[in-house]
């Protein structure tokens, strides 16, 4: 392998919006990254489906066919 052609691989601290912190390896520069979702708060992993965006459509449907 040729010397000095590979990027610097180091560990960084990643912080989720929910407050979870964990370490991960990366070649990007920086010591800390912020992410929106992680495996502790993502609906796929927690099995909690959020219907906030569909709430308006469900109410509209119920009002229309409640007669």
Image (cartoon, grey):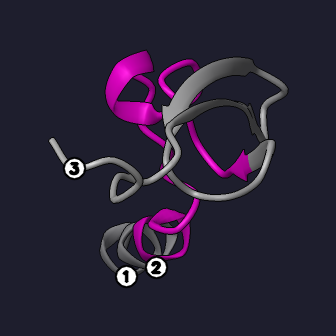
Which mark, residue 56? none
CA gap between label 2 and label 3 equals: 64 Å
In this view, the residue in front, 29 or 59, is: 29
Give the secondary structure at mark 2: helix
Mark 1 or 3, closer to the camera: 3
Q: Using the numbered discs, state the Cα–Cα distance from disc 1 to disc 3 in whole angstroms.
A: 69 Å
Over which residues does the magenta segment extend?
34-58
**Residue 64 — which label?**
1
Q: Mark 2 vs mark 1: give the one in front.
A: 2
Residue 57 belongs to magenta span: yes
Dots 2, 1 in contact, CB < 8 A: yes
- Mark 1, Cα crowd under 10 Å, few <14 / some 14-19 / many 20+, is few
Q: Position of residue 58 (x, y in %)?
A: 42, 65
Q: Residues within 10 Å of mark 3 (few under 14, many from 20)?
A: few
In x, y percent, where is residue 50?
50, 44
Q: Residue at x 54, y 74 (%)?
A: 56
Drawn side of residue 59 relative to residue 67, left or right: right
Question: What separation in Å lies between label 2 and label 1 (alpha carbons)?
Answer: 6 Å
Asked if the residue under mark 3 is in contact with the one under mark 2, i.e. CB atoms within 8 Å, the reply is no
Percent across and percent down for residue 12 are 69, 33
Would you name the residue on which mark 3 appears? 2
Q: Is residue 43 left or right of residue 65?
A: right
Q: Quadrant of the N terminus?
A: top left
From this view, report whether residue 48 is shown above or below residue 35. above
- Judge by depth and name the residue closer to the eye, 65 or 30: 30
Q: Secondary structure at mark 3?
A: loop
Among the two numbered marks 1 and 3 on one chain, the one whose residue lies closer to the N terminus: 3
Q: Secondary structure at mark 1?
A: helix
User: Which residue was labeled with disc 2?
Assistant: 60
Residue at image coords 35%, 52%: 6
């Amino acid at each position: 392998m040729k010397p000095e052609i590979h990027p610097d691989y180091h560990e960084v601290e990643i912080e989720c919006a929910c407050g979870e912190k964990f370490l991960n390896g990366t070649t990007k520069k920086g010591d800390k990254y912020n992410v929106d979702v992680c495996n502790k708060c993502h609906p796929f992993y927690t099995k909690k489906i959020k219907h906030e965006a569909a709430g308006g459509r469900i109410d509209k449907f119920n009002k229309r066919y409640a007669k």
